[in-house]
Image (cartoon, rainbow, N blue to C red):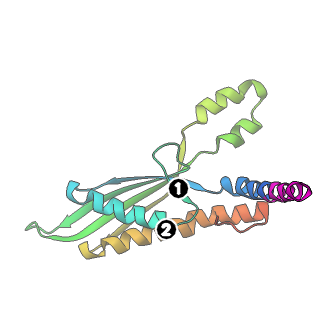
Amino acid sequence: MRYISSLLAVIFIFSSAYLAAAQETKGLNSRVQLSVSAAEESREIISGFFTEKLNGIQDVELVNRDPSWKIDVVVMDLLAQDGTKNGVVVSVVILRQFDTKTITAVSPPSQKKYMEILTNNLYRFEEHWVRTGTPDDLKNLCDAIIADFDAEHLDRQRKLHQKLHGKPGKTQ
């Protein structure tokens, strides 16, 4: 019986430490909503390129609701005067969820609820990229866009998290 109590105590200690670490990194996970506008015949393929690359980033979760980041993509074919498709243009807008917690934290108590309602579901503009290439370059363009999003935006989050918590920014 004594060994069972000791074993349960050890399990409790390790599970508490694990849960604390999971809670600490929970806020780091980036909830990303992807929206792709393109010709009907290529929209699913292009969405697949972006989704595959985003799924390869460990601390990104693709969502349909309540995202912390929005990536809005428009892809258009570049046509010659004779109608020949000779290129593609990819326009990407990166939006980040407005930090409601900061505004409500510094608001007077009588205004907190009002400020929360006003700032809920607001996003701020972070970046706009326009990339061009040949039709054969489309997958590489999509991969490069997500690599840039990861390096230029998500890495900033990870570095801030590391400063605040003293732990590496990428979740396991």
Is 58 one of the magenta-colored residues? no
Q: CA distance from mark 2 to mark 1?
A: 10 Å
Mark found first going from the N terminus, 2 or 1: 2
Mark 2 in CB contact with mark 1 (< 8 angstroms): no
The rendered magenta stretch, by its main secondary structure, is classed as helix
- Magenta segment boundaries in residue numbering: 1-14
Q: Label 1's element?
A: strand
Residue identified by numbered label 2:
56
Along the viewing direction, whichever of 50 and 110 lies nearer the viewer: 50
Residue situated furthest front in the rendering: 1
The residue under the point 80% across, 60% down is: 14
| Amino acid at dot 2 | Gly
Along the viewing direction, whichever of 168 and 78 lies nearer the viewer: 168
Label ID, residue 61 = 1
Expressed as whole percent of the image width and height from the top left, the position of residue 100 reads 65, 40
Residue situated furthest right in the rendering: 2
Within 10 Å of the Cα at label 2, are there few (<14), some (14-19), or many (20+) other Cα atoms? few
Q: Label 2's element?
A: loop
Within 10 Å of the Cα at label 1, are there few (<14), some (14-19), or many (20+) other Cα atoms? some
| Amino acid at dot 1 | Glu
Expressed as whole percent of the image width and height from the top left, the position of residue 157 reads 64, 61
Along the viewing direction, whichever of 72 and 59 lies nearer the viewer: 59
The residue under the point 59% across, 45% down is: 98
